[in-house]
Every structure is written in structure tokens, then in C-alpha cells.
């Protein structure tokens, strides 16, 4: 029997359409089996034009499952804040299609480097394996830091009032350039005076800004990395089969954030795309994406 069921509060996703974990079962002290339901169609995590499933579903499910377990199994109070210092995923099969990677998915979650302070979880690493019918679809990892609501308020100070401040909606680059169909899903704006793009924030977006936040959600930055890599790819046909992103600091809603992308070579992966977000001349995130050009059917 499952140990518990996923809720919007546990997953930090109030809309059921955006919530992918269903329930979980404890296998051992720090090992869990999470049942996940991946959609065959979604307003944001939509299938790619060639029929492949959106790989960022892996990243978003990693985030949701980790927070759910942190609350339910490690006692992190609702209202405490989470920061993913690192997040990475890799698609492990060429058959990562809507037909093969939607519906019921099993996710094995291994928690390690579990750090407690006064009996409270302050951080841990998670490694996830996504599988269906004994076929491994993807793997992922994350490094999580937990901060109490009191400490977070002290750290953020006046930035806590950011949700009440207007954020200008910049003109989007062409959706096709970013691999998107709908302009409302584009998170890049043209940059007139600097290389790259400026981060475009639509705080009314139902998935990217599902609830008020005093900083830019990490999922927006992952999407910015994906879109920048796509824009840099000839023909804009980029399929991010892997991504590893590290977050250096909070990305503020009311300050310009510049997105820079370049081709690079990684010893483990070969040719990759490196994307960086810069705000106030300091790095906010760095992402390394490995990919494949989508094959037309």
C-alpha cells in the first residue's frame, strides 16, 4: 500500500494539471518508489513535433517528487523554502516518445548525503530512475537545500515584497526560434545592447508562475536554458537529451537577467551547449545541455 498520496501542497503545484507524482511507497530508510502520471498532452510540457515526450518533464518531476518526500518523509514543514543547488537529467532511451513515456511511470528515488540539524532536514542529494515495464526511460539527480521560513525571511529581506511589484512583459523572440509554438511560452526577449537574450517573465503564466514568488522560479531558468540552446542551433531543431544546471544565487524578478549561450566541448559528452544567466554582472545559473537534432518523420 502507498505510504501517502501526492497533493498540491506537498508538490508545490496547486493545479492538478501540473502535478505529476501520484503516490509513494517507502522501500527502505532513504529509498522510495514514487508513482507518476505523465500526460500525453499538456499546456506547457507538450510533446515535441516528432512525437517525442518533453524531456523537461523529467526535471519537473524530479523537483516535485523531491519536495514531496522532503515534506512527507523527512518532516520539512509546509512553508519552508527549498533551493535546488543542482539539477540534472539524462534520457536513457531513443524511444522516449509519447506512446512509451506517458501514463503510469515508476520512479525509484535514492536519497543520500542526508543532512540534519536539530533533527531537521537541511539538505540532501537525490538520484532518480524513471522506468516503465522494466525499461529505464531516464535518470536524474538533484541537490536540495532546505531553509526555514524564519531564516528565509531574514535572508530575503525587502525582496519578499517582490510579488507585489509589477514586472514588465518584454516582447518575445519568434516562438519558432525557441522551439515553441505559442508566444506566451517564450521566456526569451531580444537584447538590443548586449549579446544573447534578456529573460522574459510573464508572471501570469499558469504553469511557470503557478503561485506568487519573490524570485524567478527555477523551472523558468531551465526553460530559458532549453530555449537559448534551441535558438543557437541551426534550424532551431534541438532535443535536450541531457541537462545539468547549477544555481548560484536567486534570480530577482525586478532586475534584468541576460541569457548567454555558446557551443562547447565536454570531456564526458563531447559537443554540448553551455548556457548562462547573468544578473547584475554575476552568474545566476550555468547549464550544460547535450542534445540531438530532431529527425523528421
Image: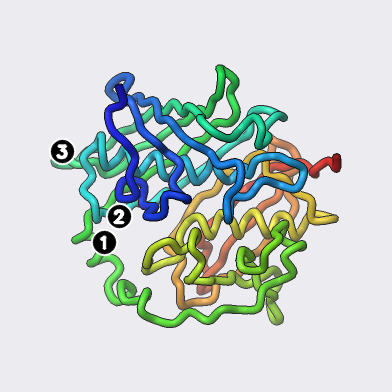
Q: Which is more foreground, mark 3 or mark 2?
A: 2
**Which of the two residues, 171 or 48, is positioned nearer the viewer here?**
48
Q: Position of residue 110 (x, y in %)?
A: 40, 27
Disc 3: CA contacts within 10 A as few (<14), some (14-19) or many (>=20): few
**Horizontally, is 135 left or right of 272 in the view?**
left
Q: Earlier in the sequence, mark 3 or mark 1?
A: 3
Question: Do tag 3 and tag 2 residues touch (Cβ < 8 Å)?
Answer: no
Q: Helix, strand, or loop for circle 1? A: helix
**Which of the two residues, 116 or 75, is positioned nearer the viewer here?**
75
Q: Position of residue 224 (x, y in %)?
A: 60, 60
**Distance (Cα) linking label 3 and label 2:** 17 Å
Q: Residue at x 61, y 63 (%)?
A: 185
The residue that mark 2 highlights is 81
Q: Residue at x 27, y 28 (%)?
A: 3
**Horizontally, is 188 left or right of 281 in the view?**
right
User: Which quadrant holds the C terminus?
Assistant: top right
Amino acid at each position: 500500500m502507498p505510504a501517502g498520496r501526492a497533493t498540491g501542497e506537498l508538490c508545490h503545484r496547486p493545479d492538478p494539471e501540473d502535478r505529476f507524482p501520484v503516490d509513494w511507497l517507502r522501500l527502505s530508510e532513504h529509498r522510495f518508489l514514487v508513482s507518476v502520471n505523465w500526460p500525453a498532452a499538456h499546456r506547457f510540457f507538450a510533446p515535441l513535433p516528432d512525437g517525442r515526450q518533453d524531456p523537461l518533464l523529467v526535471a519537473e518531476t524530479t523537483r516535485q517528487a523531491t519536495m514531496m518526500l522532503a515534506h512527507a518523509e523527512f518532516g520539512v514543514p509546509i512553508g519552508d523554502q527549498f533551493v535546488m543547488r543542482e539539477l540534472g537529467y539524462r534520457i536513457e532511451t531513443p524511444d522516449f516518445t509519447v506512446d512509451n513515456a506517458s501514463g503510469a511511470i515508476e520512479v525509484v528515488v535514492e536519497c543520500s548525503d542526508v543532512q540534519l540539524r536539530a533533527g531537521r532536514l537541511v539538505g540532501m542529494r537525490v538520484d532518480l530512475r524513471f522506468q516503465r515495464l522494466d525499461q529505464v526511460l531516464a535518470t536524474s539527480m538533484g541537490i536540495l537545500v532546505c531553509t526555514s521560513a524564519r531564516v528565509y525571511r531574514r535572508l530575503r529581506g525587502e525582496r519578499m515584497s517582490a510579488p507585489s511589484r509589477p514586472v514588465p512583459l518584454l516582447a518575445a523572440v519568434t516562438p519558432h526560434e525557441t522551439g515553441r509554438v505559442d508566444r506566451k511560452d517564450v521566456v526569451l526577449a531580444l537584447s538590443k545592447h548586449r549579446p544573447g537574450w534578456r529573460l522574459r517573465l510573464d508572471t501570469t503564466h499558469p504553469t511557470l508562475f503557478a503561485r506568487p514568488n519573490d524570485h524567478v522560479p527555477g523551472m523558468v531558468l531551465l526553460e530559458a536554458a532549453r530555449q537559448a540552446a534551441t535558438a543557437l542551433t541551426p534550424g532551431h531543431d534541438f532535443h535536450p537529451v541531457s541537462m545539468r544546471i547549477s544555481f548560484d544565487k536567486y534570480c530577482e524578478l525586478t532586475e534584468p537577467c541576460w541569457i548567454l549561450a555558446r557551443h562547447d566541448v565536454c570531456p564526458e559528452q563531447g559537443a554540448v551547449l553551455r548556457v548562462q544567466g547573468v544578473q547584475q554582472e554575476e552568474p545566476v545559473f550555468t547549464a550544460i545541455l547535450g542534445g540531438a537534432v530532431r529527425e523528421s518523420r
